[in-house]
């Protein structure tokens, strides 16, 4: 089900006995735009809603006649709308839209979970809070950025706490994890242990039991989907664990070399350069960072070469998907709260991945070394291409 604002516009327009052209002329837009609104192909810009409401002599809330509970498809659509809005709207407009959606769906806990994640993934793109700009003379200095991050992460924590208190058992587990992740970013280590405990919990995966139950009921296809989707998730989790582990190995070169080689073999086994290039790039970034700390220029060169090559060939937009091996997971991906989309746009991810290397103080000493020069030039080319794409989209506003 899609957001029905287009249907409401069509209904009110017909009630007033005016044509799409007449409405378009009043709004200073094209007739095609009105047609797309009414057929659900696009939504009105948030800045146009007050004018639309005035034209129809109603409130903005009257136009947004939506149930307090959203379907998975509606949550995907709103998240995508907010994510894409950074490319066409100001940060203030995006925040206004975000907060408006949160107020409207304050009792839809799966939606609040995703909005908490939106804060987590986009805090750096949202406007500097007013209370920060009042106390800081330089808006972009280090302390201001830290205050900005703290402000929006605390907003995320409030949403996760609300979900924990009122959501389902499944949502409670997810909200606890993301609350702890927010606390980690806020430097609240003791609070994390209070939420999650300080030891590895006993691991009792239920997927095998669910798959076995489907098999007993002669539904082999459902069993296969359950196990494939579980394996897919465990593959990404294992590589994430290896990624985090590398950062602990700065003083253990032998363990670091073993982790690097095993990680690469794991990536090759599951073809992660195609299946999920972003998590492989994160692994390589962590490895080359540790190699830089160790002063291991030979291994750093190998890891950076892989990193740049993979970044260059990763196509936009990046979406979650299966492959020839994971050939039964598309339905499972479709049922995820965000579907196949990444939490951040492909452009933002690429910008972050290039900046992670180009701006790293640990890698600055290697930039002028002959063997590294070409790699840094290629990275700069990727960064420039990403910036051009973003600029091009902004010019079409």
Image: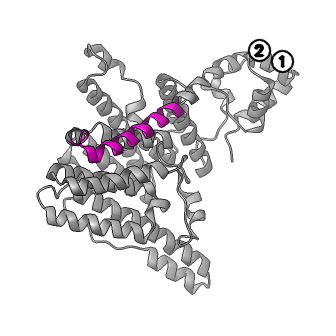
The image quarter in which residue 216 lies: bottom right
Residue 345 visible in this rendered orientation of the protein = no
- The x and y percentages for residue 93 are 52, 24
Dots 1 and 2: beta carbons under 8 Å? yes
Q: Residue at x 24, y 26 (%)?
A: 142
Q: Secondary structure at mark 1?
A: helix
The image quarter in which residue 321 lies: bottom right
Residue 139 visible in this rendered orientation of the protein = yes
The image quarter in which residue 382 lies: top left
- The x and y percentages for residue 149 are 31, 33
Q: Residue at x 41, y 41 (%)?
A: 121
Nearer the observer, 186 or 298: 298
Magenta stretch encompasses residue 381:
yes
Nearer the observer, 357 or 98: 357
Which residue is under mark 2?
26
Main secondary structure type of the part rendered in magenta: helix
Q: Residue at x 17, y 48 (%)?
A: 190
Q: 10 Å neighbourhood of mark 2: few (<14), some, or many (≥20)?
A: few
State how far apart marks 1 and 2 are (Cα).
6 Å
The vertical placement of 7 against 249, above or below, is: above
The vertical placement of 73 against 24, above or below, is: below
Which residue is under mark 1?
22
Q: 10 Å neighbourhood of mark 1: few (<14), some, or many (≥20)?
A: few
Q: Give the colour scheme shown.
A: one colour
Magenta stretch encompasses residue 218:
no
Magenta region: 366-390
Q: Secondary structure at mark 2?
A: helix
Q: Residue at x 36, y 23 (%)?
A: 128
């Amino acid at each position: 089900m899609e957001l029905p604002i287009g249907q409401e516009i069509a209904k009110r327009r017909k009630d007033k006995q005016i044509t799409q052209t007449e409405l378009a002329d009043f709004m200073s837009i094209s007739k095609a735009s009105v047609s797309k609104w009414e057929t659900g192909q696009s939504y009105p810009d948030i800045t146009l809603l007050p004018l639309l409401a005035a034209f129809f002599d109603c409130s903005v809330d009257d136009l947004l006649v939506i149930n307090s509970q959203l379907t998975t498809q509606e949550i995907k659509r709103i998240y995508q709308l907010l994510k894409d809005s950074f490319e066409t709207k100001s940060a203030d407009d995006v925040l206004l839209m975000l907060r408006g959606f949160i107020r409207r769906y304050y009792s839809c806990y799966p939606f609040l979970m995703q909005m908490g994640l939106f804060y987590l993934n986009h805090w750096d793109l949202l406007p500097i809070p007013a209370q920060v700009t009042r106390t800081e003379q330089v808006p972009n200095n280090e302390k201001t950025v830290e205050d900005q991050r703290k402000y929006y992460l605390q907003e995320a924590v409030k949403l996760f706490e609300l979900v924990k208190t009122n959501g389902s058992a499944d949502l409670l587990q997810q909200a606890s994890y993301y609350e702890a992740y927010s606390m980690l970013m806020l430097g609240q280590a003791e609070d994390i242990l209070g939420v999650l405990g300080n030891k590895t919990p006993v691991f009792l995966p239920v997927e095998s039991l669910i798959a076995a139950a489907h098999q007993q009921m002669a539904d082999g296809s459902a069993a296969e989907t359950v196990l494939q989707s579980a394996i897919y998730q465990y593959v990404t989790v294992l590589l994430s664990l290896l990624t985090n582990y590398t950062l602990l190995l700065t003083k253990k070169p032998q363990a670091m070399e073993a982790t690097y080689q095993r990680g690469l073999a794991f990536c090759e086994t599951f073809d992660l350069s195609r299946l999920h290039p972003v998590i492989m790039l994160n692994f390589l970034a962590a490895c080359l960072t540790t190699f830089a700390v160790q002063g291991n220029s030979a291994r750093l060169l190998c890891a950076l070469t892989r990193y740049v090559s993979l970044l260059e060939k990763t196509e936009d937009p990046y979406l979650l998907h299966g492959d020839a091996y994971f050939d039964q997971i598309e339905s499972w991906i479709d049922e995820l709260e965000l579907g196949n989309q990444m939490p951040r746009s492909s452009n933002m991810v690429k910008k972050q991945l290039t900046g992670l290397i180009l701006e790293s103080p640990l890698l600055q000493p290697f930039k002028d070394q002959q063997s590294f020069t070409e790699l840094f030039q290629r990275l700069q080319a990727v960064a420039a291409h990403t910036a051009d794409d973003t600029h091009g989209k902004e010019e079409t506003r």
